[in-house]
Structures are given as C-alpha cells and as structure tokens.
Image (spheres, coloured by chain):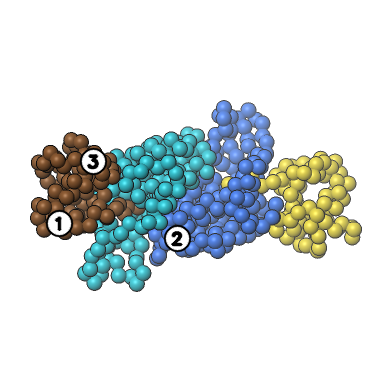
Chain colours: A cyan, B blue, C yellow, D brown
Amino acid sequence: MRLVAVQEEDFDAGALLARLGGEGTGGVASFTGIVRQVAGGGLKALRLEHYPGMTEKALERLADEAQTRWELTGCIIIHRVGRLEPGQNIVFAAAASAHRGDALAATAYLIDQLKTRAPFWKAEDMADGATHWVEAREADDETAAAWGQVPEDR
Amino acid sequence: MRLVAVQEEDFDAGALLARLGGEGTGGVASFTGIVRQVAGGGLKALRLEHYPGMTEKALERLADEAQTRWELTGCIIIHRVGRLEPGQNIVFAAAASAHRGDALAATAYLIDQLKTRAPFWKAEDMADGATHWVEAREADDETAAAWGQVPEDR
Amino acid sequence: MRVLYFAWLRERIGKSSEELELPEEVDTPRALINWLRTLGPGYAAAFSDEKPVRCAIDQEFQPLDAPLGRPKEIGFFPPVTGG
Amino acid sequence: MRVLYFAWLRERIGKSSEELELPEEVDTPRALINWLRTLGPGYAAAFSDEKPVRCAIDQEFQPLDAPLGRPKEIGFFPPVTGG
C-alpha cells in the first residue's frame, strides 16, 4: 500500500492508519504535523505554496527511498497546501512494517527529508496584517543530512 | 493530555491522535502494534495476560519518563489484553510536542521500553491446537537499554 | 503474604495467587522460590529452572536476591513479552 | 523555455511563470539569473542576492552552476520550508 498526495483538503489520520494495517504488518508508525501558533500568539494563518508536478515527484522519491532502506509493507505521505490556521493538520507521514523499528525509522526519515527536499514554501499571515515568508532552518538540513547518503539536491 | 490504559476493547487510533493535537502542539507521532501472523500462517490468536495494578503503574512510569526526557504536550499508552487475532490492534503509543523530533523519539521510547518493562505475557494459540508462551527477545532488551539510564528493573 | 503467579508459572502451579505464611528465614525472592519448590510437584515444575523467573515485590521489578522485607505481595513470572 | 518563480521571488517579479527565449551564452542557472536581472527592477530585486536562491531544472533540484542544457522548464525559489 502506497499513497502520496498534495492536497488542500484535510486528511483523516485514523482512516489512513487503518489502510496501512495489512498482511504481514506488525506495526504502523505515523507523524502528523500541525500548524503551531507562534510565540506571542499573533499567527492568523499559514499559506502553503508548492511546485506542482515537482512536489509529487519529490514525495514519490522519498517514499521510494524509505521503501528501499527499510522493509515496509506500506507508506503514506500527504502534504496540505493553501491556507491553514493554527491547530490544523499540515502534513502526514506513516510507514508500516513487520518490525516496529523499521516503521518508526522510516516515518522519521520521511518527515526529516520532506522538510528539506520537497518544494513547499510557507508564508505567515499575522493578525496585525504583517505577512512574511518563513526562513529555512539550518537544523532541518542537519537532521536530514544525518540520515546519510542523501543526494546533494538543494 | 495524558492517557494510560490496559483494556480488552479495541482503540480508535484516529480519535486518540485527535485528542493529542492541542495548544502548543506542532506534531503528533504514534505507533500502533498489530498482531502479526507467524511465518507459515498457523497462528489462530494471541492471549495477552498481564499483572493488574502493576501494569498500570509501569505504564504510568514510562509516560512520566517520556515527559521528563522530552518536552511533550501529550502522551498516550494503551495496551490490549485478552484474546487477539492476527490483524487486530494490540498496542498504541503516541506523543505530542511542539517539536517533531521530541514526538518521534518519545513514541519510540515508549514502545521500546514497554516491551521489556511492563508486565505483559503473550501465549500463541495455533490452528493445529498447540499453544505456547512467547519467549522474550534479547534484541528487545538491547533496544530498550540503548536509550540509557533505564532502571535495572528486570 | 500474597504470592502471584503469571503465564506458564501460573499454569504449572495451577493457581494465579494465594496467601502464604512464610518461614522467617525466607528473606529474598530466591529463598522464597526454594521454599515454594517444597510445596508440591507443580511448584517444583514451575521453579525447576530459576533462570527464566522474574519477580516483582509490591509491584516493582526486583532481582531475585533483593531483600524481601515484609511486602503485601510478591509476583513471579517469566520475562515480559508485551508490546 | 518556461521559467517559474515561487514564494518571494514570484512576489517580487510579479508573475509565477513565463516563456523566455534565452541568449545562447546562458549556460547555467547562475548565468540565467544574471540575465534575468537585466529584465527589470522586479527581477533585479528578486535576484539581488543569489545566496537564498535555489533552482530546479526540469523539476530536479540542481546547483546554480549546473549545466543548463535545453530543459523544458527551470524553477527559481528560496530554500524549501515544508513539513
């Protein structure tokens, strides 16, 4: 079972997890990213922009890599785009395997790599009317690189 | 938000995940353990036995430890007992945090520690009528110990 | 003292718990195992090999050579296999 | 060649994509950036500093000094911030 999607609509994490529990699966790990209110509370909404076509290819590649690195029985990546308010879901990554370690590691890999290798950009619309683009975090590059053997593609 | 339970009934992973997405949460990680059919396909059901009272205390302690080690906004551990067939849910661990790394690490910690530090025992009822107790795996001890500073309590 | 048995120890002994008056010289879980062995063939079978036996004193895991003290309960069981 | 702009590059240039005929000497993304700067103040503002500019040639991330070749499309954007 494999599912990769870029969409404006919300996703149903429970229904997605249920789809991953198939033959030979001993465990399903998942990560759900949620739009977090900024310190001080001034965030009205995020706007998520992406590169249509390229994004889907990048996510499919991450799923391929996870399925190569670990023995998975299933793999899901869903990323939302458009306007998202604090508390709303933004991203879902999940992996199923016979072995818990594989499911957990693959899920962490998917979300770490997605942060630096999929063409999404976030702008913050603040309650005071200000708007600004979120800057990339060096820590995310380091976390992604720590998995090793990642193509130098940024 | 904190929830620890030992129960015969199934759990609803989606509903549990939704309860973890509160104020200050940037990500929710989860692991769902599923009864896996054995190689050859002869497993009819698992019977899960536990030490009532002690089990709940052990799980509460694991949740405490996770909340001490990582900055969590929520934490759930649910373990089923009784008769469970292949494909059915057996355990759920989840953690929510402002930061994805904390949520992912805490979830892995909970499930790794639970394997060696909570008083549950599995018996396998086979289709051919045989029944036997599952033996503990040394690899689980090593995985649990790799987190370091775990009380020597087995 | 309440003594509890789990998994195949419970099956071999034929009961899940019992109230026992221990002799004064029983001062560790290991000494208790040695004493339990004398209570009958089920106990002897359950405790024939100590290596796979673990215990909890008042619901806390303890090594077999821990001081027993005067707990309310002690549980004997094989290594845990949850998750 | 189709050239696409994302995030604040798109905002400064004022369009998300356009078809451009490139001079023959434009043989890397960096050379293309230098040429784009001459097209108007929006471009000059978008590309005033190359450091935060990333690119993809035919939807594959590439360094700014990669050979340009004859792709169908090239995208310029800041470092990604998804997830």
Task: Give the x, y percent position of residue A112.
Answer: 40, 49
Name the residue type under label 1.
Ala
Badge 2 and badge 1 in a common chain = no
Q: Position of residue A111 (x, y in %)?
A: 40, 49
Give the amino acid at mark 2: Ser
Given the image, on which type of amino acid does mark 3 rest? Answer: Ile
Asked if residue A31 lies left or right of residue C57, the reply is left
Q: Nearer the viewer, residue A52 or B51?
A: A52
Residue underneath mark 2: B97
Q: Is residue D33 left or right of residue B119?
A: left
Point out which mark residue D57 bears: 3
| Of marks 2 and 1, the one in the foreground | 1
Q: CA distance from mark 3 to mark 1?
A: 21 Å
Q: Residue at x 40, y 42 (%)?
A: A150
The number of discs equals 3
Task: Count neighbours of disc 2 (C-alpha within 10 A) and say few if under 14, some if 14 to 19, many if 20 or more.
Answer: many
Residue receiving disc 1 = D44
> Where is residue C42, by image quadrant?
top right
Query: Residue drawn at (51%, 55%), measured in percent from left and top?
Result: B106
Q: Position of residue A84 (x, y in %)?
A: 28, 58
